[in-house]
Image: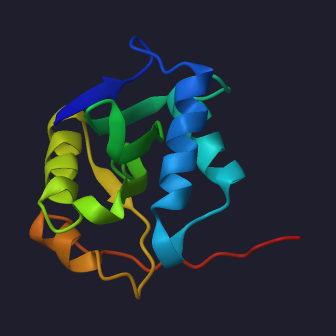
Amino acid sequence: MTIKTFDAFTRLSINDINRTANFIYANSGDFRDSKSAIRKSLLYAAKEIAGLGGYVFIMEHENNIVGAVVVNKTGMNEYLSENILVYIAVKEEYRGQGITSELIKHTKRYCRGAIAIHINKDNPMIKLFEDEGFEARNIEMRLTRK
């Protein structure tokens, strides 16, 4: 299995963005966002929409996606993390094989600066992120406007 890295220089095609959005949506379980939100984060990472861009890491086996990570750059430091790990997903039949951990390690090696993740308080992945060095520091409170 190989991990492909995409950023502003090695860009995703629109087909790859759609393929990756569909993969993340299908493999995010109970904690998934809308396909539109996932696609937006990919477009931002690929610099297809205004912003600082980011990174997309795709693990493939025989040209099929088995895991994916989306990181968006925030442009901040000291007071907020420079990067936010927006999505991580692994195909169900590949879970429990260390792929998520390998993707997190790759993300930590590739990204410069601090990396934040917003994770649902009931998500069992919290333990894995703690094992990879992430610490719970803040509670996010959100005012959602309709």
**What colour scheme does the image use?**
rainbow
Residue 44 seen by the camera: no
In the visual, does 32 lie left or right of 89? Answer: right
Closest to the observer, 79 or 133: 133
Circle count? 0
Locate residue 100, reporting x and y percent. Answer: 22, 57
Q: Residue furthest right?
A: 146
Indicate whether 137 appears above or below 45: below
Give the residue drawn at x 28%, y 75%.
125
Give the residue drawn at x 16%, y 68%.
96
Locate residue 12, reporting x and y percent. Answer: 49, 21
Q: Quadrant of residue 9?
A: top left
Q: Residue furthest top?
A: 9
Locate residue 119, reporting x and y percent. Answer: 42, 72
Indicate whether 43 appears above or below 129: above
Indicate whether 139 appears above or below 89: below
Q: Residue furthest front?
A: 62
In the visual, does 39 lie left or right of 131? Answer: right
Q: Quadrant of the N terminus?
A: top left
Give the residue drawn at x 57%, y 47%.
22
Q: Quadrant of residue 54?
A: top left
In the visual, does 15 lie left or right of 77? Answer: right
Locate residue 75, reporting x and y percent. Answer: 46, 36
In the visual, does 19 lie left or right of 91? Answer: right
Q: Quadrant of the C terminus?
A: bottom right
Closest to the observer, 49 or 23: 23
Give the residue drawn at x 76%, y 73%.
144
Residue 32 seen by the camera: yes
